[in-house]
């Protein structure tokens, strides 16, 4: 007997350690908790202590086969429901998530090391926002009447694609999953999610909560490693669309497999997002904006992190000093503690990678790396993957720290003298995800906004992804958009033309 009863409590569980244990060792396939067919599982580790908190089912092609088969069966009936009814069910799921925000915030803090107050609770709330937003869009799956000839009625209708495979990363797993699953479902597709190996628990809980209101098989989740579990999902013949967020390297692998099958893909990949600060900006607001932009509360583990900051020369030194002083005031510590601003890096591998970048920067002639914010002194956290945020100055554009995505709490600040020169610097990157401009001269700001090679440009703010804002990059940052009505229509349906000759 493979299936097992729901091991997780019905009511919100505010003890993340207990909930992690309860969710151990399962996929969610066809509305049921199911261990890996191979019987294998792998450890989920609390990065603040190094302790194992759960085991996750280690999925492979056999589990993917079961999940896709159930999803394909369920999709046929799901697509027959009126679109607004599908939306209403997704909306109902949003209410359940809203009731479980505190629980989900604590669970994601435990498995990712992101601080509860500044990041994890916020993420859980945004998941509910996204489900509410898409839940209301069922009626927007409209077609058109096309003028063709007087005696020919020509219309288009939007049809779902079938089974969608969604592959997600570990940095904002609940939100990035919601951005894929909600529009896919409302559009009439069924979904199989492959969670990130580092953070499978909170997304499993969300899947379970949503399965309380959705028909079984419409939304399934498998956990496991990329090549063994993600790759078979992309390659499965019944998967008719893949939506992926992760690294450029893996995105290219996914794209190649999808090309062989001739199926559409959405790829949200990396970033090296510039922040451009003019001397006429509102200094205090911009300073606060720099901390948000750099996503220091997420340890910089964000594709949109402002990891290159260009500051107009008259305020350069003042800005660098003030930013360092502000980051110094941030509290690094236990992610579950309400006092904590900054938690941990996700994994040993990421920790080593970020440390190597920092060492390389420090070893660069002429560069200065200022470490900010005190390391936690709690002995219980001595094995925690904490890294002090580092602000580099004096690097050149050839540096790996300036060109590559670090995905850690490291930013590089440069002075500039001329808007055209800074524009060239900002665009001199393989990435093009996001950018922000800080100035009270809207003429300058808008002019640059139009010329910046990025999918999202913000002036005098730098928000993270929000429902209803089209989000997605250019160049190596990816293909396609998420988070908007356009994303649902363009990426989760196809347009069929129907013609009637009335002559
Ligand atoms: P990161 O290095 O940040 O973990 P990845 O791109 O490797 O980024 O991972 C993002 C997601 O892609 C994860 O869920 C991972 O398991 C999955 N993944 C990794 N390799 C593959 C692959 N070959 N095919 C499909 N999915 C993969």
Image (cartoon, rainbow, N blue to C red):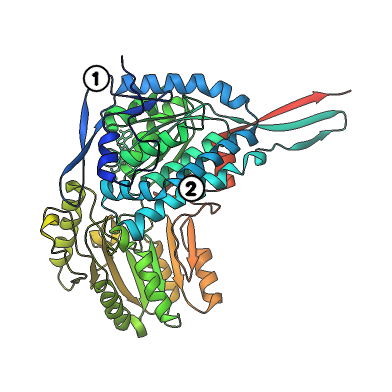
In which quarter of the view is residue 42 placed? Answer: top left
From what the image shows, is residue 483 above or below residue 286?
A: above
Ligand 1 picture quarter: top left
Name the residue located 39 percent from the left edge and 68 percent from the top edge.
275
The answer to whether residue 481 is seen in the rendering is no
Which of these two is toward me, 423 or 275? 275
Name the residue located 34 percent from the left edge and 59 percent from the top edge.
117
Which of these two is toward me, 105 or 222? 105
Label 1 residue SS: loop
* Residue highlighted by disc 1: 38
Tell us which disc is closer to us: 1 or 2: 2
Name the residue located 76 percent from the left edge and 26 percent from the top edge.
499
Picture coordinates of residue 407 (x, y %)? 28, 54
Picture coordinates of residue 69 (x, y %)? 43, 19
The answer to whether residue 121 is seen in the rendering is yes
From what the image shows, is residue 124 above or below residue 299?
A: above
Q: Earlier in the sequence, mark 1 or mark 2?
A: 1
Q: Is residue 294 left or right of residue 48?
A: right
* Residue highlighted by disc 2: 128
Picture coordinates of residue 489 (x, y %)? 59, 40
Label 2 residue SS: helix
Give the quarter of the figure containing the N terminus. Answer: top left
Name the residue located 63 percent from the left edge and 34 percent from the top edge.
85
Give the quarter of the figure containing the C terminus. Answer: top right
Q: Is residue 45 left or right of residue 450?
A: left
Q: Is residue 113 left or right of residue 103?
A: left
Picture coordinates of residue 128 (x, y %)? 48, 47
């Amino acid at each position: 007997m493979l299936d097992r009863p729901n091991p997780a409590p019905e009511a919100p569980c505010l003890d993340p350690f207990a909930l992690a244990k309860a969710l151990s060792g399962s996929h969610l396939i066809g509305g049921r908790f199911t261990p890996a067919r191979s019987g294998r599982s792998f450890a989920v580790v609390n990065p603040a202590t190094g302790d194992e908190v759960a085991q996750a089912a280690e999925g492979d092609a056999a589990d993917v086969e079961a999940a896709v088969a159930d999803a394909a069966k369920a999709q046929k009936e799901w697509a027959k429901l009126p679109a607004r009814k599908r939306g209403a069910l997704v909306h109902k799921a949003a209410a359940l998530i809203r009731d479980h925000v505190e629980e989900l915030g604590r669970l994601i803090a435990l498995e990712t090391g992101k601080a509860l107050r500044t990041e994890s609770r916020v993420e859980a709330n945004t998941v509910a926002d996204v489900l509410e937003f898409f839940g209301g869009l069922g009626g927007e799956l409209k077609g058109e009447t096309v003028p063709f000839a007087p005696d020919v009625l020509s219309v288009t209708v939007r049809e779902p694609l079938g089974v969608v495979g969604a592959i997600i990363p570990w940095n904002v797993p609940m939100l990035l999953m919601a951005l894929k699953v909600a529009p896919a479902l409302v559009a009439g597709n069924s979904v199989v999610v492959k969670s990130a190996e580092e953070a499978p628990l909170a997304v499993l809980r969300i899947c379970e909560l949503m399965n309380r209101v959705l028909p079984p098989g419409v939304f399934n989740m498998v956990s496991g490693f990329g090549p063994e579990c993600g790759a078979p999902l992309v390659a499965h013949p019944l998967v008719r669309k893949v939506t992926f967020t992760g690294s450029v390297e893996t995105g290219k692998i996914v794209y190649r497999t999808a090309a062989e099958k001739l199926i559409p893909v959405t790829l949200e990949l990396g970033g090296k997002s510039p922040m451009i600060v003019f001397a006429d900006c509102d200094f205090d607001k911009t300073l606060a904006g720099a901390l948000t932009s750099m996503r220091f509360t997420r340890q910089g583990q964000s594709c949109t992190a402002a990891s290159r900051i260009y500051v107009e020369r008259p305020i350069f030194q003042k800005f660098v000093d003030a930013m360092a002083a502000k980051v110094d005031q941030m509290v690094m510590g236990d992610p579950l503690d309400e006092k904590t601003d900054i938690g941990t890096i996700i994994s040993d591998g990421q920790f080593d990678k970020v440390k190597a970048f920092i060492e390389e920067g420090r070893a660069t002639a002429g560069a200065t790396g200022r470490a900010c914010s005190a390391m936690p002194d709690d002995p219980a956290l001595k094995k925690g993957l904490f890294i002090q945020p580092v602000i580099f100055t004096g690097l050149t554009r050839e540096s790996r720290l300036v060109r590559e995505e670090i995905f850690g709490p490291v930013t590089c600040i440069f002075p500039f003298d001329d808007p055209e020169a800074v524009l060239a610097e900002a665009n001199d990157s393989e990435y093009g995800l996001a950018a922000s401009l800080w100035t009270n001269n809207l003429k300058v700001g808008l002019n640059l906004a139009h010329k910046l090679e990025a999918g999202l440009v913000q002036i005098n703010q730098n928000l993270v992804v929000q429902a209803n804002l089209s989000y997605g990059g250019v160049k190596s940052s990816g293909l396609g958009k998420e988070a908007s009505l356009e994303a649902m229509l363009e990426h989760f349906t196809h347009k069929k033309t129907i013609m009637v000759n009335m002559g």
